[in-house]
């Protein structure tokens, strides 16, 4: 996080940040003579005209070369420039740190095990657990982080899962981008665990061995997830599972189990667009009928049903940023937080529980992540007053919904 040293520091006519990956910057408040307005890169790397260029502004004193940290700095740049190691040297701007110099503020451990923290680095201990960023859910974003295995160790980065104290919720409702040196193709480094193998030749060409740092970029746009390893794309996956959605969710770091030692540092995120505000209008389903609050009643427990569209307040739904659907001042709710097929879907006072969270799927389904099941029109019927309930996700027209745009 901070490297205190004495050297001859240069000012530069132009700032290289937009064309190079900055590795270190000067704190101009810590010395006199800085003139770059507070953003003062001092070491960087970049791909240039088919080659590799590494620059450091340090090394003007004899004492520098007696400093093991400075020699490691030089050696890292030389090894990368000579293509003996890989790194992500693409320009990088606009990222917000989630873990680094600020510690684990905003993060929470779910399940057993933990992470040890030292020198702005997290190292997994025991498990199976998950350290997840609970402060915010993300939709369209680029997530970057550095990771390192001690040996043939197991871990992963989870995306697109709902808030939960149970680490298995991320397994069942999100996606894991795997870190594991030796396993089957769909369960090794760079894979979307259990769903899609990485491009193994591309992965192997980009991968640094155990003991060295690697950088992941996980780029999520809609239901598309791209995985970049040290700046090279190694996986391109599109979600079609109605029980999962990448369009909104949390991120987390896995501590897999005893003996699995994987470290993480410099976790940062860049949102790729302004999250949409609340959308309001009709929700339509099978037969073009509207999702309707029976009798336009606002009492807790009122049945939600299908009915001929009529433009009334009972059919005017707000799709909120917290993934709730709201009408008449209350939320669409799974009765009792149930998970059984046929559980009633009702109107209920908004309470922030998983029973009131709904995730639109790429196939038109509307999933309740807590249960893993879908909003369903009973009996595949489009008749007025057809009850809506929870049911195992399928492909029928009675589970296809059109939300307000």
Image (tube, rainbow, N blue to C red):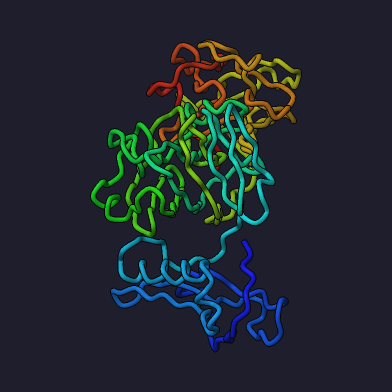
- Image quarter where the N terminus lies is bottom right
The front one of 139 and 376 is 139
Question: Which residue: 54% across, 20% down?
Answer: 371
Q: Position of residue 217 (x, y in %)?
A: 44, 53
Query: How many marks do you count on the picture?
Result: 0
Q: Residue at x 61, y 67 (%)?
A: 3
Q: Give the x, y percent position of residue 262.
A: 47, 42
**Which quadrant holds residue 36?**
bottom right
Residue 6 image offset from top left, x and y in percent = 63, 79
Q: Quadrant of residue 405?
A: top right
- Tell me if residue 282 can be seen: yes
Above or below, comparing residue 346 to residue 110 in the picture: above
User: Relative to 6, is 289 above or below?
Assistant: above
**Left or right for 132, reference 222:** right
Q: Nearer the viewer, residue 256 or 371?
A: 256
- Is 290 rendered above or below residue 83? above
Quadrant in the rendering for residue 395: top left
Is 289 left, or right, of 27 in this rendering? left
Asked if one can make out residue 290 in the rendered structure from this viewpoint, the answer is no
Residue 142 in percent (x, y) is at: 49, 53
Residue located 51% across and 49% down the image: 140
């Amino acid at each position: 996080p901070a490297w205190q040293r004495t050297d001859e520091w240069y000012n530069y006519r132009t700032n290289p940040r937009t064309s190079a990956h900055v590795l270190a910057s000067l704190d101009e408040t810590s010395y006199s003579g800085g003139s770059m307005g507070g953003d003062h890169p001092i070491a960087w790397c970049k791909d240039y005209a088919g080659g590799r260029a590494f620059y450091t502004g340090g090394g003007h004193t004899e004492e520098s070369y007696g400093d093991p940290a400075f020699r490691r700095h030089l050696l890292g740049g030389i090894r990368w420039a000579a293509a003996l190691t890989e790194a992500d040297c693409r320009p990088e701007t606009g990222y917000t740190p989630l873990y680094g110099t600020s510690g684990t503020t905003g993060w929470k451990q779910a399940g057993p095990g933990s992470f040890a923290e030292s020198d702005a680095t997290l190292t997994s201990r025991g498990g199976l657990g998950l350290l997840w960023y609970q402060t915010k859910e993300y939709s369209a974003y680029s997530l970057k982080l550095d990771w390192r295995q001690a040996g043939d160790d197991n871990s992963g980065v989870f995306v697109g899962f709902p808030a939960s104290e149970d680490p298995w919720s991320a397994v069942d409702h999100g996606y894991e981008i795997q870190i594991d040196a030796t396993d089957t193709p769909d369960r090794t480094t760079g894979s979307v665990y259990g769903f899609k193998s990485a491009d193994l030749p591309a992965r192997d060409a980009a991968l640094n061995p155990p003991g060295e740092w690697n950088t992941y970029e996980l780029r999520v746009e809609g239901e598309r997830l791209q995985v970049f390893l040290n700046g090279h794309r190694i996986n391109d996956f599109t979600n079609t599972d109605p029980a999962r959605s990448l369009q909104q969710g949390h991120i987390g770091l896995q501590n897999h189990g005893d003996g699995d030692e994987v470290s993480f540092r410099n976790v940062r995120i860049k949102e790729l667009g302004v999250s949409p505000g609340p959308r309001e209008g009709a929700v339509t389903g099978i037969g073009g009928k509207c999702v309707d609050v029976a009798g336009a009643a606002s009492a807790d427990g009122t049945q939600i049903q299908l009915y001929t569209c009529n433009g009334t307040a009972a059919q005017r739904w707000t799709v909120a940023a917290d993934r709730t659907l709201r009408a008449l001042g209350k939320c669409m709710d799974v009765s009792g937080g149930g998970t059984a097929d046929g559980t009633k879907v009702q109107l209920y006072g908004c309470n922030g529980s998983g029973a009131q969270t709904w995730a639109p799927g790429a196939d038109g389904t509307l999933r309740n992540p807590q249960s893993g099941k879908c909003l369903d029109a009973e009996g595949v019927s489009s008749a007025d007053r057809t009850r809506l309930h929870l049911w195992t996700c399928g492909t029928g027209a009675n589970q296809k919904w059109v939300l307000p745009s």
